[in-house]
Image (cartoon, rainbow, N blue to C red):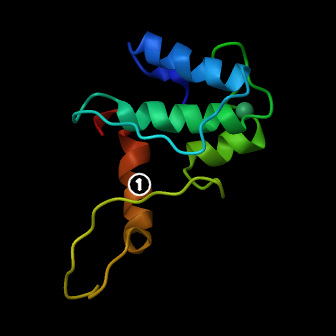
Amino acid sequence: MLFNEIIGQEKVKEKLISTVKDGRISHAQIFLGNEGSGNLAIALAYAQYVSCSNRKEKDSCGQCPSCKKYQKLIHPDLHFVFPVVRNKNFKKPVSNDFLKEWREITIENPLKN
Ligand SMILES: [Zn+2]
C-alpha cells in the first residue's frame, strides 16, 4: 500500500513519514479508527515505507523486493492479529488460521478496514 493511494489523512501521513526521516520510529503503535477511516491502509503504507529500500520523499517506491512483499502482505516483518471465533474446524482459533482469507480480503479492499 502506498501513501498516495490513501485519500486524505495528510497530517497523519506527514507525521508518520517524519518519524522515519528523524529516525524516531516507535517500537509499537496503534492505528485506531472507525470502519472506513483508512487506519489499516495507513498502517500498511507506513510499514511498507519503513522497510522500503528505495523510499522517496513522501512515499515508498512500490518496486523494491520489500515493497513487493508488503503489497502481497507476505513480508516476514508484517504480522497480523485480529479477532477470530471458534467454530467446528477451529476449537482454539488464532489469527494465523485465517491468514490466507485475511490477506485476500485486505488486498482486495484495504481501505474498507
Ligand atoms: Zn520500496
Which of the pair 81/28 is nearer the observer? 28
List x then y, in percent, for residue 77: 64, 54
Residue positioned 37% across, 74% down in the render: 94
Can residue 59 be seen here? The reply is no
In what quadrant of the picture does the C terminus appear?
top left
> What amino acid is found at the position of numbered circle 1 in the picture?
Glu
**Residue at horizontal 58%, vertical 53%?**
78
Of 35 and 101, nearer the camera is 35
The verdict on label 1 being within 8 Å of ligand 1 is: no
Q: Is residue 40 visible?
A: yes
**Horizontal relation, residue 41 to residue 24: left or right:** left
x, y percentage for residue 64? 76, 36
Measured along the vertical axis of the image, is residue 113 above or below residue 21?
Answer: below
Q: Give SS at disc 1.
A: helix
**Residue placed under numbered mark 1 in the picture:** 104
Q: Whole-percent x and y of residue 89?
A: 27, 87
| Residue at 35% across, 39% down | 109
Count the marks: how many? 1
Q: Name the residue located 38 percent from the left edge and 58 percent from the top edge.
A: 102
Tell me where residue 69 appears, x and y as whole percent.
65, 48
The one of 39 and 21 positioned closer to us in this rendering? 21
In which image quadrant can residue 86 be found? bottom left
Q: Is residue 112 above or below residue 90?
A: above
The answer to whether residue 56 is above or below residue 103 is above
> Ligand 1 appears in which quadrant?
top right
Number of residues whose C-alpha sits closer than 10 Å to that of mark 1, classed few (under 14), some (14–19) or many (20 or more): few
